[in-house]
Amino acid sequence: MSDHVVQVRSLSIRSAAGAHLLDAVDLAVAPGEVVGLAGTSGSGKTTLARALLGDVRPGLERTGGSVVVAGHDPFRPRGRDALRGRRVTYLGQDPAAGLNPARRVGDLVGELVRLRTGAARGEVHTRVHALFDLVGLPTDRGFLRRRPHEVSGGQAQRVALASALAGDPDLLVLDEPTSGLDPVLVDRVGRLVAGRVRGGDGRAALVVSHDARFLASTADRVVHLERGRVVPAPAVPRPVAAERVSASSEQVLRVVVTAGHGRGPVLDGAELSVAAGECVAVTGPSGSGKSTFLRALAGLHPDARGTLHLAGRPLPWPAGRRGPDRRAVALVAQDSASALNPRESVRTSLSRPLRGLDPRAVEQEVARLLERVRLSPDVLDRRSPQLSGGQRQRVNLARALAAGPRVLLCDEVTSALDERTASAVLDLLAGLRADLGLAVVLVTHDLEVARRSADRVLRVHEGRFAPC
């Protein structure tokens, strides 16, 4: 019997077209060890992480090799049943998408505690409070009764992490667990994972991340993948400054927003203006209202109120906006997986905003959109589960551009991407600003990204925006 929690030998997984996503990969994780998994978007990181649960995405097949986790083969039904949710917990790249939108966050985690530990009702309540406190979430009754859409992206990420920890698994598999979190919370998650694994009892963790600093401070060692193969650690790329774009003096958007989640307002008269070709970055800690602000402008936050001026003209508040201006403001959401219908192909997703054009014009416009976001035509017939995180994010961006907006709202669009792909997305936004005069509001927890890319950086403070 292996003395490793994870033992992967010569694992190969390929697509129906014959492309190898994993090519004879070996990986071992010992008890008490945190192993980091790094690599560019599409290098096979998520494919390898999911294989530890015997999960292969639609359109892929395992063509060779073996996987043993805690003494079980996850590709066999009996082994899969023995591991999932008990011995192994997997937290995916877009964990908020897995939270039931109809359930309150406290009940979501409590149900998992009950199912995985058999705890009595009173003990479940105590354990839920302990888990929320562990991941840095409020434990008051008001927060526990919120539903997933009533918390910020970073808070939803931590609710999902609390869910993953509910059963106290032997192996924790985390795919980009810090995307969308501010630096203080990134450090907290790193300490939590490392402390839990190194506390004894033979636990282990595999952590997929593009964040080299996070892996350096959390993992005992880092395995690097490139094109489905394990490779030596690459040289650390130097950050590339995004192309500077001269903004116009024409003010495209001016808004004042007040919004909350059933209690006091998260945003209280937050005011922002942005000019044609300008990028304004908005930063602040998780839960401060950054994503709420973007959702309010996109008409997706029903409790929001305020005023909106587009190109100097007052318009109805976004939730009730109709007519030719309804597409003027487009949102690229933080959760790229849930933003796309998993049953739809990329072609269908990009064609939907183009209804009304003749078929030939739709085909030409879809091809132009793909070229603009630097995606190859071979993704057109894939569905979102068959795309890498970087590809999904660019499809979301292309779909937002299909509406022909004047203002693009970008919510943590680089947070789950490796350095190279993130730089490409930021360059892409700079190009859209220069070519189309597109105004961009960029929400990010990463001050370096904000300062490299934006003309102005604002910070959410006490429900309003202040210069950073």
Image (tube, grey):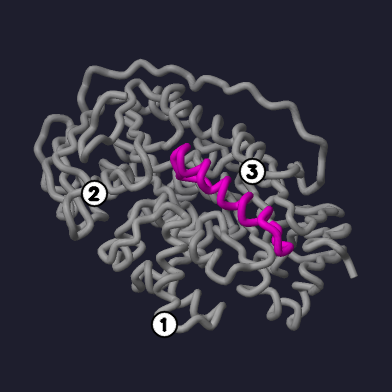
Q: Which residue is drawn at 19% across and 60% down?
A: 262
Q: Nearer the viewer, residue 278 or 113?
A: 113
Instruction: Say which element carries label 2.
Output: helix
Give the number of the disc on residue 198: none
Instruction: Say which element carries label 1.
Output: helix
Q: Nearer the viewer, residue 225 or 129?
A: 129
The location of residue 2, given as percent across then percent down, is 88, 66
The location of residue 360, given as percent across then percent down, is 46, 50
Question: Is residue 200 located in the magenta-colored stretch of the structure?
Answer: yes
Q: Which of 416 and 246 is in front in this view?
A: 416
Q: Nearer the viewer, residue 302 or 87?
A: 87
Dot 2 or dot 3, earlier in sequence: 3
Instruction: Say which element carries label 3.
Output: helix
Q: Distance between the residues labelled 2 and 3?
A: 36 Å
Dot 1 or dot 2, earlier in sequence: 1
Q: How many labels does the image show?
A: 3
Q: Which residue is drawn at 51% across and 34% down?
A: 425
What residue is disc 1 on? 121
- The correct choice, above or below, for 197 with respect to 391 in the image is below
The location of residue 349, given as percent across then percent down, is 46, 56
Mark 2: give few (<14), some (14-19) or many (20+) Cα within 10 Å. many
Q: Residue at x 28, y 25 (%)?
A: 276
What residue is disc 2 on? 296
- The correct choice, above or below, for 126 with respect to 209 in the image is below
Q: Residue at x 74, y 59 (%)?
A: 15
Question: Is residue 181 located in the magenta-colored stretch of the structure?
Answer: yes
What residue is disc 3 on? 218
Query: Which residues are the magenta region?
Result: 178-204
Amino acid type, label 1: Arg
